[in-house]
Image (tube, helix red, strand yellow):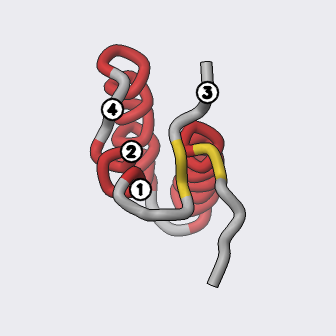
């Protein structure tokens, strides 16, 4: 089975954007406590920007279909 080689960075940006939008919608509809999800996403984005890795990048980096973006 072949898979398209996706960029890890693009997948992380997509995941972060999706979770941020989900956090905002859930905060408006369900409870403001869901804004903590948005804070968690932001902290992970800062970790990735500062150190080049975050928990999501470590987990997703172990999949065979994702690759590091070429520089």
The one nearer the camera, 15 or 57, is 57
Disc 2 and disc 4: Cα gap in Å?
6 Å
**Image quadrant occupied by the N terminus:** bottom right
- Relative to residue 30, is residue 61 drawn left or right? left
Crowd rating for badge 4 (residues with CA inside 10 Å; few <14, some 14–19, many 20+): some
Q: Nearer the viewer, residue 28 or 45?
A: 45
Instruction: Report the residue marked by disc 2.
Output: 57
- Between marks 3 and 4, how big is the CA–CA gap? 16 Å
Residue 53, labelled with which disc?
Answer: 4
Q: Which residue is mark 1?
A: 60
Give SS at disc 3. loop
Query: Which residue is at 55% across, 62% downward?
Result: 65
Residue 22: percent from left, percent from top: 59, 58
Expressed as whole percent of the image width and height from the top left, the position of residue 5 reads 66, 56
User: Which label is found at residue 70?
Assistant: 3
Q: Distance of mark 3 from mark 2, alpha carbons?
A: 16 Å
Residue 56 at x, y = what percent? 36, 49
Callout 2–callout 4 Cβ contact below 8 Å: yes
Q: Residue at x 66, y 76 (%)?
A: 2
Between 33 and 70, which is closer to the camera in this rendering? 70
Bin the neighbour count of mark 2 within 10 Å (Cα to Cα): few under 14, some 14-19, many 20 and up. some
Q: Considering only order in the chain, which callout, 2 or 3, is on the residue closer to the N terminus? A: 2
Residue 59 placement: quadrant: bottom left
């Amino acid at each position: 089975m072949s898979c398209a080689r996706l960029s890890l960075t693009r997948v992380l940006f997509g995941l972060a954007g999706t979770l941020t939008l989900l956090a905002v919608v859930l905060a408006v509809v369900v409870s403001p406590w869901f804004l903590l999800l948005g804070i968690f996403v932001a902290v992970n984005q800062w970790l990735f920007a500062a150190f080049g890795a975050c928990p999501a990048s470590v987990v997703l980096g172990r999949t065979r279909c994702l690759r590091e973006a070429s520089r």
